[in-house]
Amino acid sequence: MSADAAIPYTVGIRPDTGLNNVKLGIWLFLSSEVMLFGSLFAGYILLRTGNPNWGAGTELVNIPLAALNTVVLITSSVTMVMSWVAAMERNLGKLRLFMGATVGLGAVFMVIKAIEYHEKLAHGAPPSYSTFIACYFTFTGLHALHVLAGMCVNFYFGFPGAKMMATDPQPSVRRAALEALGVLGTPQDRALLLACFTDAVPFVRTHAARAVAAFGDADVATRLAGLLSDRQWMVRAAARYSLRRIGSTANDALIAALWSSDRFAANGASEVLFQTGAMMEMARRVLDVPLTSSDAASAVQRFMTVAGAHLTQALLNQFTDRDRVTLVRYLADRNSNA
C-alpha cells in the first residue's frame, strides 16, 4: 500500500466492536499507564519484602495531606465529567466553568504535593534518605507530572479551544448528518455533498467523501478522484474508500488520475485500481489480446511507474512465472518502441 494508506475507523465506528480508533487508542494509552505504574508497584513490593529493616512508612508521610489530595483528585474527576456534559450540551459557559474547576483542582493538588515535598526536605529526608523515600519521590513525582500534563491539556480545551468543543463537540454528529444525506439519495443531497468537497474543514470533506459513495456514478467518481490530491490524509483515505465502493464505474476516473502530477493522486489511484482488481483485469487483457489492448497496456505501464515496487510486485505475483515474464517483456518492448 502507499505511504498514505487508509487507516480505517479513525472517525467511523467499527460495526463489530462499536468503537473507533480514537477510543481504542485512549484505552491502549490507559493500559500502558496501568503497566507503567503496575511495574513500579511490583518493584516496590519486591524491595519491601526483601528488606527486613524497611521500617514504618507512616512515620515519614503526612497521611492527612495525602487523604486530602485523594479527595481533590476524585473531585476533579467529577468536574471533568461535567465538562464533557457541558460540551455535549454546547453550553460554553458551563464548559469553561467546569474545565476551570478541573484545572484549579489540579493546581490545588500540585500545591499540596509541594507542601509534602517541602516537609520531607525540611526534615532532612531527600530521595537519598532511604529506599522508601526514593520510591515515594519517584512514584508521586511521576504522578504529579501526569497531573501537570492534564492541567495543560484541559486548560487548552477549556479556554483557547472551548469554542471549538462547544460548537462541534463530536465530529460524529457532523459525520452522521452528511451520511444521512447519502442515504436519502436525492439530487439535492448529492449536490450538497459534492459542494462539501471544497469546504475549508477537513472533517466535512472527509465525511462528504464517504457519504457520496451512495450515489456511485461516473461524475461522483471523477470528483472523488480529484480529492486524491487533497493535502489532508484523512480526506484522501475517505476518497479511496468511496472509490473502492463505487467499483468499476470509477475505473476511468482512476486511470486518468494515474497521469496526475500530484504523487498523492497517482499513488492513491494505483492503490484503488489494485485493490479492486481492475489493474489485474487490464494486465490480463494485455496478455490475452495485446494487439487490441493499447490503452490497457498504457495504464499498466503507468501503474508500474507510479505505484511503487511493492504494489508492482504484488500485481506480478498474481500471474504464473511464464505470464509474468511475458507481460514484463511485452511492456519493456512497447516502452522501447514508443
Image (cartoon, grey):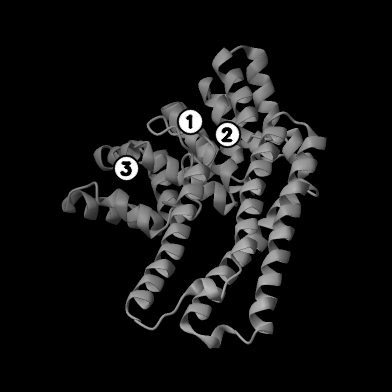
Q: Amino acid at mark 1?
A: Ala
Classed neighbour count for the residue bearing mark 2: other residues with Cα under 10 Å, few (<14), some (14–19), many (≥20): many
**Residue, far right:** 93
Decide if residue 208 is on the left or right side of residue 301.
right
Cα separation, mark 2 vs mark 3, equals 24 Å
Closer to the N terminus: mark 3 or mark 1?
Answer: 1
Q: Position of residue 168 (x, y in %)?
A: 71, 34
Label 1 SS: helix
Tell me which numbered mark, 2 or 3, is placed earlier along the sequence.
Answer: 2
The C terminus appears in which quarter of the rendering?
bottom left
Q: CA distance from mark 3 to mark 1?
A: 17 Å
**Which residue is depicted at the point 63% across and 19% down?**
190
Query: Around disc 3, counting alpha carbons within 10 Å, would you say few (fewer than 14), some (14 to 19), or many (20 or more)?
Result: many
Nearer the observer, 261 or 46: 46
Alpha carbons under labels 1 and 2: distance apart: 9 Å
User: With respect to residue 205, does 124 lie above or below?
Assistant: below
> From the viewer's perspective, is the residue at label 2 or at label 3 nearer?
2
Percent position (x, y) of residue 31? Answer: 44, 54
Asked which secondary structure carries label 3, the reply is helix
The mark found on residue 250 in the picture is 1
Circle 2: residue type: Leu
- Please name the residue that numbered disc 3 is placed on: 283
Identify the amino acid type marked 3.
Ala
Contact between marks 1 and 2 (CB within 8 A): the answer is: yes
Q: Are marks 2 and 3 in contact (CB under 8 Å)?
A: no
Considering the numbered disc 2 on the image, is that residue within a helix, a strand or a loop? helix
Badge number at residue 224: 2
Q: List x then y, in percent, for residue 52.
A: 34, 81
**Residue at the spot 24% in from the left edge and 46% down from the top edge:** 318
Which residue shows up at 66% across the image and 44% down it? Answer: 80
Q: Nearer the viewer, residue 316 or 174?
A: 174
